[in-house]
Image: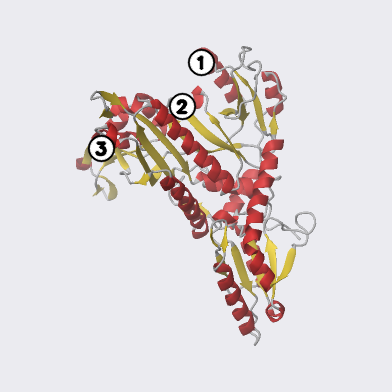
């Protein structure tokens, strides 16, 4: 039996990814270059991500808010390092009206804005402006805000979910009385992202701190969680930044201390975006399509009644409806089970493969024999085949009572199975035995997307200035980046492979998205 996709991961990983997005009905390109239309199945995944993250934010004291999409250019100009980091990606609004001139619709010359507006690339500056009005006293601190929004960063090489000109995200922004409290917040949010990625997305990650040349523009410290995709490349799946007092100085965010003096606030920002969906696809997908962790699947169990315009159709429909009701009354992974009946009048085998491509965790086919015998015949998406991939689908059968009794634990098993598969791949694909830059360069070789290369964990002396510039150039030649310095540092790291000096930590080096 051929696979459900026209191309395999080993043949061309990039084309395989695009095929999954298309055939799993997740998203499509829009008429605006670099932007995407998120379709209902893809949006359903994003909704689950939103809901679960939003709960975690509120449990840790954060409140949701919303700030404008348009930011005055003068706000960005106050923070030079920040604006320099985003300058090449910014979209600018210069007029507020269109006019037909010589038969063509174009910006009205008389409607030019006095001050250009930037389409939000991130919101530190406009939220900082609000903080300086809202924060007057130490009693107002900490201020813990989050917003769910869209942002625009002009993208020259778009790829659905991974890199688009407009994308969706959440961005948290907080203000604190001192560095210690702000750093606690920064690390707390990194841990929330780690726990969410591993327990909800079933995506193992390595949390760590970014090196100086990879920090968020304007930050004192940037932390990230890094996930390994099946082609060995790294995906930055979330970031948390300690911004020090840089934005407070630029925006005059001060507060009156308990002693009656004044002090600058210490601020943080942190966020994840729709690129998480791309990470789920590349982490869990196989040559038949998407495999969704049950925690984020819009439909966890899909029921396919086999109807043939025969008298027994009524019994099949009644059995299917009753089974769906029983399943939707159950709990799994901390929430009610989401069972769905696909009643489309298409062939059963076509519907099955459609849901295989979409990655529904459990797919049930119900025919007259199942209904008459009170049985449930199902396919686990994480265990597709009896033998090698592409062979006979591994259909299992349980009595209705047994399946209903086991449904919750089956979903939990699938969630764990997907995580374990990805965790083993991550653990087995990080090289720690390469001791020199020449060894690392030989391992990665030319930038060849067709050849799997994992990550390298190696010693780092935290070079600065010209030394750091030289390292950046070496890495760029091989399309490599430093992902982060893992938080789980081990003993004496040895000698830095770049400078030959005593190392102070280990870093991860990889190709990335």
Cβ–Cβ below 8 Å for labels 2 and 1?
A: no
Q: Quadrant of residue 358?
A: bottom right
Residue 147 % position (x, y): 37, 45
Residue marked by disc 2: 221
Q: State how far apart marks 3 and 1 are (Cα).
A: 38 Å
* Residue found 50% across the figure and 54% down from its top: 48
3 and 1 marks in contact (CB < 8 Å):
no
Of the numbered discs 2 and 1, the one sitting upstream in the chain is 2
Which of the image's four quarters has the N terminus?
Answer: bottom right
Q: Residue at x 69, y 49 (%)?
A: 8
Give the left or right position of residue 153, taking residue 508 as reference. left
Please tell me in which quadrant of the rendered image residue 431 appears: top right
Q: In this image, 19 relative to 91: left or right?
A: right
Question: Is 373 placed above or below 69 here?
Answer: below
Q: Quadrant of residue 69?
A: top left
Q: Which mark is residue 464?
A: 1
Q: Position of residue 269 (x, y in %)?
A: 41, 35
Q: Which badge, 3 or 1, comes first in the chain's sequence?
A: 3
Q: Which residue is mark 3?
A: 134
Image point (61%, 60%), residue name: 360
């Amino acid at each position: 039996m051929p696979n459900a996709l026209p191309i395999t991961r080993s043949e061309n990983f990039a084309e395989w990814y695009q095929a999954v997005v298309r055939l799993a009905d997740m998203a499509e390109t829009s008429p605006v270059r670099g932007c995407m239309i998120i379709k209902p199945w893809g949006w359903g995944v994003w909704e689950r991500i939103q809901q679960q993250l939003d709960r975690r934010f509120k449990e840790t004291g954060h409140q949701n808010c919303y700030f404008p999409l348009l930011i005055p250019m003068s706000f960005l100009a106050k923070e030079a390092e920040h604006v320099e980091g985003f300058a090449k990606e910014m979209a600018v609004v210069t007029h507020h009206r269109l006019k037909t001139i010589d038969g063509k619709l174009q910006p009205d010359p008389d409607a030019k804005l006095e001050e250009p507006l930037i389409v939000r690339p991130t919101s530190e500056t406009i939220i900082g402006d609000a903080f300086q009005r809202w924060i007057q006293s130490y009693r107002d601190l900490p201020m813990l805000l989050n917003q769910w929004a869209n942002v625009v960063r002009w993208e020259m090489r778009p790829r659905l979910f991974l890199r688009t000109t407009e994308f969706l995200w959440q961005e948290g922004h907080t203000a604190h009385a001192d560095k210690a409290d702000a750093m606690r917040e920064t690390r707390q949010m990194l841990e929330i992202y780690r726990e969410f990625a591993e327990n909800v997305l079933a995506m193992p990650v390595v949390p760590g701190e970014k090196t100086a040349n990879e920090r968020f523009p304007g930050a004192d410290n940037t932390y990230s969680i890094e996930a390994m995709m099946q082609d060995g490349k790294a995906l930055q799946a979330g970031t948390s930044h300690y911004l020090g007092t840089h934005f407070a100085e630029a925006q005059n965010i001060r507060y009156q201390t308990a002693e009656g003096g004044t002090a600058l606030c210490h601020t943080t920002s942190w966020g994840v975006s729709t690129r998480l969906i791309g990470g789920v696809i590349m982490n869990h997908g196989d040559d038949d399509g998407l495999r969704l962790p049950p925690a984020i699947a819009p439909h966890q169990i899909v029921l396919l009644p086999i109807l043939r315009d025969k008298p027994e159709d009524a019994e099949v429909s009644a059995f299917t409806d009753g089974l769906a009701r029983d399943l939707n009354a159950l709990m799994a992974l901390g929430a009610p089970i989401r069972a769905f009946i696909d009643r489309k009048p298409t062939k059963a085998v076509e519907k099955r493969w459609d849901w295989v491509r979409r990655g529904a965790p459990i797919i049930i086919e119900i025919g007259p024999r199942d209904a008459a015998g009170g049985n449930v015949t199902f396919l686990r998406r994480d265990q597709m085949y009896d033998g090698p991939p592409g062979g006979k689908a591994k259909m299992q059968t349980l009595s209705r009572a047994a399946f209903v009794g086991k449904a919750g634990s089956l979903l939990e098993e699938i969630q764990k199975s997907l995580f374990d598969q990805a965790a083993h791949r991550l653990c087995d694909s990080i090289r720690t035995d390469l001791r020199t830059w020449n060894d690392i360069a030989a391992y990665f070789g030319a930038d060849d997307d067709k050849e799997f290369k994992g990550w390298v964990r190696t010693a780092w002396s935290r070079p600065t200035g010209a030394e750091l510039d030289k390292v950046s150039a070496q890495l760029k030649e091989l399309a490599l980046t430093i992902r982060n310095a893992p938080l789980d540092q081990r003993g004496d790291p040895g000698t830095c492979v770049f400078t030959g000096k005593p190392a102070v930590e280990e870093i991860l080096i990889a190709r990335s998205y």
